Amino acid sequence: AQRVTQPEKLLSVFKGAPVELKCNYSYSGSPELFWYVQYSRQRLQLLLRHISRESIKGFTADLNKGETSFHLKKPFAQEEDSAMYYCALSGTGANSKLTFGKGITLSVRP
Amino acid sequence: DSGVTQTPKHLITATGQRVTLRCSPRSGDLSVYWYQQSLDQGLQFLIHYYNGEERAKGNILERFSAQQFPDLHSELNLSSLELGDSALYFCASSAPLYNNEQFFGPGTRLTVL
């Protein structure tokens, strides 16, 4: 079975503070990991996928297969980063559906 | 804008009724996925279609069904609606069959009274 765990529901930080949103996964194989962001219940937007290894809006995430984690990090949070963040996993081949974590609300205070 | 469109944006209906949600994928995308987002269950995968054929099913109730038409748009049919079916329903599309990058539509917010 595939599972994504986001252990925290809410993270509140001040502007300029570092951010780390945690994500752990369970999958028997080589999964693909993603972070999606959702602003005010709008559509989900892809923020990062682990295979591209890009940095989007200052966010980075490294896949740690040993710890089965894919934590999202940003060194200096901005107010516009306030949103809901979802970690998601996709399997290989025909198992292309996304399995999402419960999500975490990031609130960045001025 | 990801290019995926969904209609209607909002739908308010009564228990026992039947509704149809529509999704048009990005131009060229052959895969359509449906997801349900609710406060208690979070985001749950419902069903995946590729080029008109059902490819995978998730936690989709028997009262729900979907299809993908030759022009690649998809419809999600929800019948005998219950209060608990109130949720945001998203569709997503992707290009090649096993390319896992999915682009989401704006969602349809269903309220069952």
Image: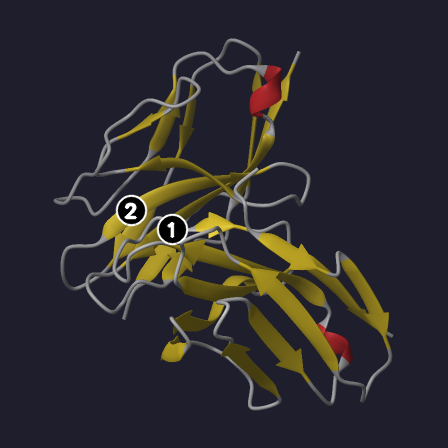
Q: Is residue B39 above or below residue A21?
A: below
Q: Residue at x 69, y 65 (%)?
A: B87
Q: Is residue B32 above or below residue A55?
A: below
Q: Position of residue A12 (x, y in %)?
A: 58, 27
Question: Which quadrant of the figure has residue A51?
Answer: top left
Q: Dot 2: few (<14), some (14–19), or many (≥20) neighbours within 10 Å? A: many
Residue ID for mark 2: A33
User: Disc 2 or 1, which lies upstream in sequence?
Assistant: 2
- Quadrant in which the N terminus of chain B appears: top right
Q: Residue at x 36, y 31 (%)?
A: A72
Q: Is residue A102 above or below residue A64?
A: below
Q: Position of residue A20 (x, y in %)?
A: 40, 28
Q: Is residue B102 left or right of residue A42?
A: left
* Mark 2 in CB contact with mark 1 (< 8 angstroms): yes
Secondary structure beneath label 1 = strand
Q: Residue at x 18, y 39 (%)?
A: A64
Question: Which quadrant of the figure has residue B42?
Answer: bottom right
Numbered disc 1: what chain?
Answer: A
Residue ID for mark 1: A88
- Indicate the amino acid at tag 1: Ala
